[in-house]
Image (spheres, helix red, strand yellow):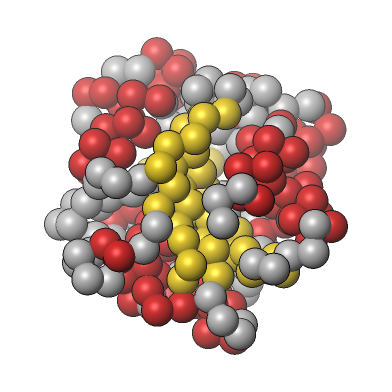
Amino acid sequence: MATFILIHGSWQWGGCFMKVANILAAAGHAVITPDLASHGFDTTPTAAVTDISIYAAPARAALEEIEGKAILVGHSVGGATCTWLGEEMHERIEALVYLTGFMAPNGKTARDFVMTPTYLKDPAIVETQGMLRLGKEGLGLDLARRDLISRSLYSDCTEHDIDRAMANVVRVTPHAPFTAVSAITPHRFGRLPRHYVECLQDRGLPLAVQREMQAAVPGAQVHQLDTGHSPFLSAPEEVAEILLNIR
């Protein structure tokens, strides 16, 4: 049986993976869904999250506490935590899975991939820019713009799931996961099996950008989901099926 550590993305919380976690657990696997620093039930002030080691500390603690190795799954900017842990603690990791996740090459950051024409000129990004608020402490989400948030992050989710998400997201994700410079090496991160799950209808991280990152860090086995940005809500069975078959 495997241990899965499911790592949420911007503004999210560990419980966003509940549907997927339940399926994996019902199949007999151990599942951990940590709240990263300043998200969910984690009480770290956003201003205190000054680098990726602080931001990713809850996921690192989970990895340190388990017996054996874990499969790390990083959604969206949760991919930055996967990359950091893949280099820092490669000996404790069985595989890395990027679920429409940011996967930056050595010397680059997640932010580098959202400052490109491919991202900035994508029609879905242009349409929903008004939901974002860039501030001193991090990247903010205007929770009053449910219409834009729904179209960007939850485009194929039910109203029930959107209600649940809106009640749990935080207003600000610290800059740390976006600005962390990837420092991966061939003999640590580079030795780990990697999987990339493309979300073909993603309006939050466009498919073209997902593929730019795959080209920048080649070697991942590619899977596809015909979903938007949050398949853990809209297609949990399909996400779980991919995870159950990567071992």
Return the x and y of residue 174 as percentages of the image width and height. Answer: 43, 59
- Decide which of 54, 65 is in the foreground and name it: 65
- Decide which of 2, 96 is in the foreground and name it: 2
Return the x and y of residue 160 as percentages of the image width and height. Answer: 84, 33
In the image, farthest residue toward the top: 123
For residue 82, above or below residue 198: below
- The answer to whether 179 appears left or right of 247 in the picture is left
- The answer to whether 230 appears left or right of 88 in the picture is right
Quadrant hosting residue 225: top right
Quadrant hosting residue 215: top left
Q: For the C terminus, which image quadrant?
A: bottom right
Residue drawn where x is 75% and y is 55% of the image: 24
In the image, farthest residue toward the left: 107
Is residue 27 visible in the rendered structure shown here?
A: yes
Return the x and y of residue 104 as percentages of the image width and height. Answer: 27, 50
For residue 12, above or below residue 198: below
Residue drawn where x is 34% and y is 53% of the image: 178
